[in-house]
Image: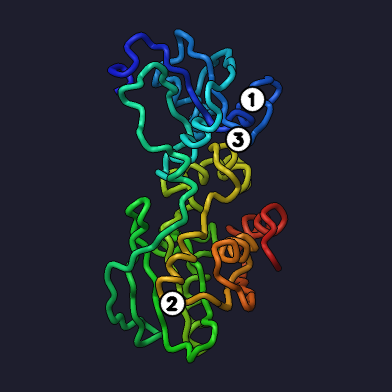
Amino acid sequence: MLCLLDPDGRARLLISGERAAALGLGNEGNAADPARPVLIERAEWLDAETALTIVDPALDMARGPIGPLRPVGLPDEEEAAAGVVLARRAGLLPALWWLEGLAEVRPTTDVREILDAPREAVIVARANLPVVDIGAAQVVAFRDAATGEEHVALVIGAFAGKPPLVRLHSECLTGDVFGSLKCDCGPQLREALRLIQHAGGGILLYLRQEGRGIGLANKIRAYQLQDRGFDTVDANRRLGFADDNRDYGLAAAMLRALGVREVRLLTNNPAKLAGLAAAGVRVAERVAHHMPTNPHNADYLATKQERSGHLR
């Protein structure tokens, strides 16, 4: 596809500011701010295969000498930032080819309008679901109106007009399904269901935000980096993502669709408290949600507290 759109090899490589910093470009004027995307000048040696070795940190140790990488000024910083955000939302590495002079294929909708639009969750199906150790529950399927992604809520018991106990649980295939010891997601999920039942009722939102919002493949890339000694924050940044790439606006939209505007939130993450509040859902109480550590996740959990501000 790149050959068809750019037969002369003029397209430049756009990467996130975080990835540029990981590549040691922070001393370059056009790459000094890790919050801004960085545009790399095209060179004869910079083909699609070499570009992949630049943007994928899992290949850092296998890549031979390249360069130099020369950052240049962005023609449109807002468009560049929007492109990086769209790539992240698609679960891709935040890197794109910057093509110019292709007015006939330019989008007619301003991508910034899409990114800034309020999140909307549409209920598409609901059914009774008996759950082991819980009993009767109801599962509600939602569709994200912007992306088409499907998310679910498990509604347990009755709230009797009181703010329900709510857990926002981001999907974790490795922890929830395979029982990974690298995180505490599986135990958190099971304990959340137990606490919600014990409270007499509540809601668990199961959000398709694998790997703190970076997607399954990128999470496994982050695991590769952790195997080399990076902590979870630095691994995400080296991939070109923020420490935590999740958005809780959709969770708030799901709660509103269920008629819930005030909750008791089961979390240690202040970003969840702030995210719901910003989207118009009142948090009446925070309920702590700590799990025991094991030798495989002790450093991971300590990093979340020390570097990501998780509450104790």
Classify mark 3: helix, strand or loop.
Answer: helix
Q: Which residue is mark 3?
A: 18
Kind of residue at badge 1: Ala
Q: Quadrant of residue 282?
A: bottom right
* Residue located 46% across and 10% down the image: 45
Residue shown at 39% from the left, 16% from the top: 101
**Quadrant showing the N terminus:** top left
Other residues around mark 1 within 10 Å, as few (<14) / some (14–19) / many (≥20): many
Q: Position of residue 156 (x, y in %)?
A: 41, 83
**Mark 3 neighbour class, 10 Å CA radius: few under 14, some 14 to 19, many 20 or more:** many
Which secondary structure, mark 2?
loop
Q: Quadrant of residue 172?
A: bottom left
Q: Which amino acid, by three-letter code, is at mark 3?
A: Glu
What residue sits right under mark 1 in the picture?
31
**Residue at the spot of label 2:** 259
Nearer-N-terminus badge (2/1): 1
Q: CA distance from mark 2 to mark 1?
A: 46 Å
Reading the chain from its start, which is encountered first: label 3 or label 2?
A: 3
Locate the C terminus by quadrant: bottom right
Q: Residue at x 39, y 11 (%)?
A: 9
Q: Residue 86: image x %, image y %? A: 44, 40
Quarter of image, res 138: bottom left
Task: Look at the numbered disc 1 and give the secondary structure of its residue.
Answer: helix
Q: Is residue 282 above or below residue 145?
A: below
In three-dimensional space, the C-alpha distance between marks 3 and 2, rounded to whole angstroms, equals 39 Å
Of the numbered discs 1 and 3, the one sitting upstream in the chain is 3
What amino acid is found at the position of numbered circle 2 in the picture? Gly
